[in-house]
Amino acid sequence: MNIRFYNARILTLKDDDTFEIQTGELWVKGNTICYIGDGTDVADVCQGNEILIWDREMDVKGNLLMPGFKDAHTHTAMTFLRSFADDLPLQSWLSDAVFPREAQLTADDIYWLDILGIMEYLTSGITSNFDMYFFPEKNAQASIDCGFRTVQTGSMNNFSGSPQQLEEDYLKVNEMGELSSFLLGFHAEYTTSRERMEAVAALAQKYHSPVFLHNSETALEVKECKERWGMTPTQLTDALGMYEYGGGGYHCVYMDDKDMEIFKNRGLTAVTNPASNLKLASGIAPVKRFLDEGIALAIGTDGPASNNCLDMFREMFLTTALAKVRETDASCVPAEDVLFAATAAGARCMGLADCDSLAVGKKADLIMIDLQQPNMQPDNHMIKNLVYSGSKSNVAMTMVNGKILYEAGKFDIGFDPAEIYAKANAIIGRMK
């Protein structure tokens, strides 16, 4: 479809990666942004003098168009465990509540549970997610069927999957279409043998892929890794040769000086998950130091069993607020850095450089923020309003790959919400 948005405020990214707000029009041709401007230079846009025929023209009424959020770490299909395994420390949460029920999941379960998660992403203005879970082909198919964009990484550990399966998933999922991609990864050092980790490193070398894993989420994880190997998880995985082509870690709460040096020198991304870390009492990540050291920072919700919601507004607020408390410095980790982490940095971490900002030639993955609500007024500072007072209620529209999937509280993903809710309840209802 060709869509013209006019009377818009448009959040763009300058060459120095700072935000700028323009006023005017944004045009979408197919799945690509073909014009951003004031509408007076029509003759110079969209391949010379080509005139577009609009399928839809939308008066934005002074509201904000901005790049969609990138949920840079999640386990989407864990929607079935939302509010089921709560108020437990991480190891008990995993071993006693989560793992036994995950073992009962089927491939079809994953498909329907992913769709439920996708619906929630859309309501939060999330246009792509970085997923780690079982049955990656089913996960990818759910996203493709909904029109959503999903990047996946491997969840292999000693109890699930294998290096051979990881390679198969990498090859298959990366061939499933433009809305589906796969980067190498595994669950965590504490669940994965050295032999299997070495196999991941070999695959990274073979396919020139970055590698991602849960890294230094708890103090116990780091302590036990040091007892096993004499190194932290970051140092061990680096020594095994995992990061020649980049990658990153999820959580990254307990990082020492050498860990920071490795992340900086290897160009790795630290993906912070503040709500999950709070709920599981894991700790507060050193976000200010990541930024001070020039380490890329992205933001993820983690899964809906440990969060329990897929809401990037809440994650943005917690990212900056917790950093301020941790450092006892109200000036640190400003709203602009947090919004960048939730959008452009997340996209780049996920290999989605063509979805990181609103610009001509980029994919049309964008959202409309309703500014005509009390929490967005007065308009003293747009970006600070988004980070400090914004909420899911302000998401008026979510577009992925040029198609509007969510608008005015309604979904256009090809599924009846009531059917999805019934299937999710039936899945958890049959489990013991």
Image: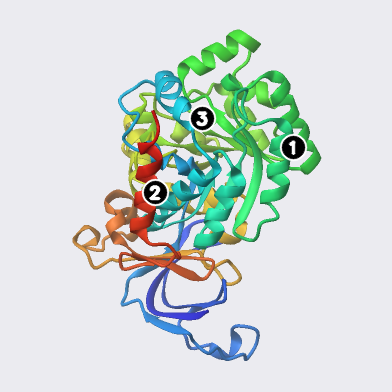
Question: In the image, what residue type sits under mark 3?
Answer: Ala
Q: In terms of secondary structure, where does tag 2 sit?
A: helix
**In the drawing, what numbered circle is on residue 33?**
none
Query: Can residue 332 be seen?
Result: no
Please report the residue visible at 74 percent of the width from the left and 34 percent of the height from the top: 164
Q: Are marks 3 and 1 in contact (CB under 8 Å)?
A: no
In the rendered image, residue 250, in percent from the top left (x then y), is placed at 52, 34
Q: Quadrant of the C terminus?
A: top left
Q: Give the x, y percent position of residue 128.
A: 51, 54
> Residue beneath label 1, please?
204
Question: What residue do we see at 63% from left, 15% from top?
Answer: 231
Name the disc covering residue 103, or none. Answer: 3
In terms of image quadrants, where is residue 355? bottom right
Q: Nearer the viewer, residue 362 or 22?
A: 362
Residue ID for mark 2: 423
The residues tagged by marks 2 and 1 sit, at their Cα atoms, a distance apart of: 37 Å
Point 43% across, 36% down: residue? 273
Image check: 144 left or right of 64?
right
Tell which of 351 and 166 is nearer to you: 166
Residue visible at 29% across and 53% down in the picture: 391
